[in-house]
Image (cartoon, rainbow, N blue to C red):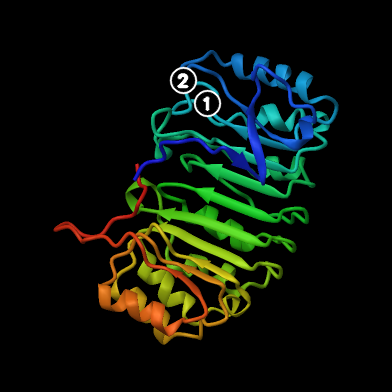
Amino acid sequence: MTINSKLSTFAGLPIVAWDADETPADPTAVAWRLEVEEFDADESEIGLAFEALLKRTGEGGPVALVVGEWGEAYERTFPIDLLVRNATRLGRLRALFAAELTFEQCEISWIKQDDITPLLEAFPALETLWVRGADGLALRPLRHEGLRELVLQSGGLPAEVVRAVGASDFPNLQRLELWLGVDNYGGDARADDLAPILAGRALPALTSLGFRNAEIADEVAAALAAAPIVARLAELDLSMGALSEAGGEALLAGQPLTHLKSLNLSHHFLSEELAQRVVDELPGVLVDVSDRQQEEEWGRYTAVSE
C-alpha cells in the first residue's frame, strides 16, 4: 500500500487550495491547503504562497491548514519556522496537517521532519495535529492543554518520539494515533516504550487509541491485554500492521474488550478461524478483520514502510 491520494477534507472541513480560483464566502469554513507546485521549488516559494494565503483568509489566518509540498521535502525539513514566526498572524489556527504528501511527491520515510515541540509551544490553542514522515522527527515532553487529536504517520517512528509522547501531559487529548512502522526505517520502539501511554496517567481524556502500521503488532497486542488505559477506550486500532496468531490470541486472552465501540485489525496475518473468533467473541463491537494478508517466505510486513 502507498499513500497515493490527497485528502478532500480535514478536521471536518472541505479542503480548498490556497490558489483556488474562487475564495469561499467564509474563509473560516474550509481547511486551506498550502503547497508549491514543483517538488524542487525554491525555498522562498512556500513563503510567498503563505503570504498569498493569509491575504485570502484575512486577519487570524485559517482555522485549519494542510501543508503539502514545500520544495525538496526529501532534503529540506518541514517549514516549522515559517509557522512559528508567524504564530501571532495565525491566531485562528486550530488544526494542522504537517506534510500531507503522496508517494509520488515524496515517500513517507523520506519526508524530512524536525523537532515539533516549538510548533506546539507556539500554538497553545491547537486542537488537531497530524504529522506525516519521521526522518528527523523529534519531540520534547511538554504540557499542552489544547490538543485533542495527535496523529503521527510514519514508516518508522523513533522510540524517542514515542517515549516523549508518553512523557508529555495532554490532559484533553481524546485521540492518539501512532504509526510505529518498521525498524528498517527508524521504527525502533518496543512495547516497553509504550508503557507510559498504556498506563494512561497523562492522558485522562483519551478514548481513541491507535498503534497502526506496526511491525511489532504482536508485542503491542500482548501489552494491551493488561493495559489500564484499555478499559476507558471506545476505539482501538491495530490496523495496517503485522498482527499474527500470537497477537490475536493475546487480545482474546487479555482483559475484556466488549466495552469497545470499534476494534480495527484490518491488514493482518490472522488465520480465517481466529479472525472469525475475534468477531464472534465481541458481538457488540464493530470489528474490522478485512484485508487478510499471506505471510511471505521472508516474513510479515506492514502496510506502509518506505
Which of the marked residues, 2 or 1, is nearer the chain's N terminus? Answer: 2
State the mark number for residue 69: 1
64 displayed left or right of 237: right
Q: Where is residue 73 in the image (x, y as percent from the top left)?
A: 48, 27
Dot 2 lies on which element? loop
The residue labelled by disc 2 is 39
Disc 2 packing (10 Å; few <14; some 14–19; many ≥20)? some
Callout 2 touching callout 1 (CB < 8 Å): yes
| Quarter of image, res 292 | bottom left
Q: What residue type is labelled 2?
A: Phe
Residue 301 drawn at (x, y percent): 28, 56
Q: In this view, does 55 lie to the left or right of 262?
A: right
User: In the shown orientation, is residue 292 left or right of residue 178?
Assistant: left
Task: Establish if 194 lies above or below 121.
Answer: below
Cα distance, mark 2 to mark 1? 6 Å
Whether residue 141 can be seen here: no
> Which quadrant of the rendered structure holds the N terminus?
top left
Q: Which residue lies furthest to the right in this view?
A: 59
Whether residue 182 appears in this view of the structure is yes
Q: In which quarter of the image is the C terminus?
A: top left
